[in-house]
Image (spheres, grey):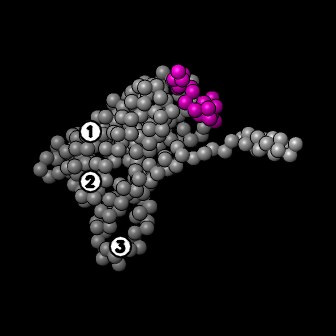
Amino acid sequence: MTRPETLDRIEPAAARTAGRPWYRRPWIVPLLAVAVLFVLFRLPAYLSFDTGNALLPLQEGYPELHFLLLTGHILFGSVALITCSLQVWPWLVKHHPRIHRASGRLYVFAGVLPSGLLAGVVGVIAVQDPAGRIGNVLLTVLWLATTFFGFRAALRRDFKLHRRWMIRSFALCWSIVVNRVWIVVLMLILMPFEEGYYGGDFDAMIEDVAVASIWLSWIVNLMIAQWWLDRRPKRRNAQPRKRIEENTTAA
């Protein structure tokens, strides 16, 4: 019977790199900083419970309910954004597995599950182009699904599979942040065409930018995550082995 993997035996390469000091991973500091700044920028406007502070257009028939649903989605989504950033920190997995497990449970039950369910409702009733609503709902379904499979793999102690699914979940979770980057990029690309293609209709251009950024943010993130999972890191001892084989053959 094969021995089940443990958190510090996810993969040989991952286990080796997880032993590095936290400051040897410079990406974790800006990652957490961006997550915290994004939450600080988005959350206060909704915690005021003033519909006038909504950063998205609300349904005219029930603006208070729409605002309440948005507030819940963003509140739980903020928990998801912070905790999922901790989940991909190898040093934390290696040296503080209890904190890793606790943040993982928070990510699933206080982040993804409530935020995802609310996102599904908000995505359907959003004042937005149908293509944008479909993109958001599909993103929500995939986010819930990848997180479910990742959590199920952890319960089965298949931590290698757990890691793969959670990297996909992380990519989808962070699409909300990357979405803002795509908006700026698309604005710069389409701005020269505002007078010609859009006839000076700035609102029409913004609507196209908003829809395109929704799809690009999670599709590109997911593609990068899959590339990261499927890549084959170069082995440091590949050359010595090759030389040994050549010498053996020559002998």
Could you say whether the residue bearing mark 3 is in a helix, strand or loop?
loop
Q: Which residue is mark 2?
A: 133
Q: Residue 182 appears at what percent x and percent y?
A: 42, 57
Say which residue appears at 60% left-offset and 37% top-offset: 25
Q: Which residue is mark 1?
A: 117
Quadrant in which residue 110 is drawn? top left
Query: Dot 1, how many residues are within 10 Å of its Cα: few (below 14), some (14-19), or many (20+)?
Result: some
**Badge 3 or badge 1: first in the primary sequence:** 1
Work out which residue is located at the far bottom of the displayed protein and give it: 196
Could you say whether the residue bearing mark 1 is in a helix, strand or loop?
helix
Q: Height in image: 202 above or below 244? A: below
- Magenta span of residues: 1-24
Query: Dot 2, how many residues are within 10 Å of its Cα: few (below 14), some (14-19), or many (20+)?
Result: many
Say which residue appears at 51% left-offset and 33% top-offset: 160
Q: Is residue 122 at all visible to an observer of this figure? A: yes
Q: Nearer the viewer, residue 126 or 162?
A: 162
Q: Tell me which amino acid carries mark 2.
A: Arg
- The label nearer to you, 3 versus 1, is 1
Magenta residue check for 42: no
Magenta residue check for 12: yes
Q: Tell me which amino acid carries mark 1.
A: Leu
- The label nearer to you, 3 versus 2, is 2
Q: Nearer the viewer, residue 77 or 117?
A: 117
Q: CA distance from mark 3 to mark 2?
A: 24 Å
**Badge 3 or badge 2: first in the primary sequence:** 2
Say which residue appears at 55% left-offset and 30% top-offset: 10
**Badge 1 or badge 2: first in the primary sequence:** 1
Q: Nearer the viewer, residue 93 or 36?
A: 93
Q: Residue 30 appears at what percent x and percent y?
A: 53, 42
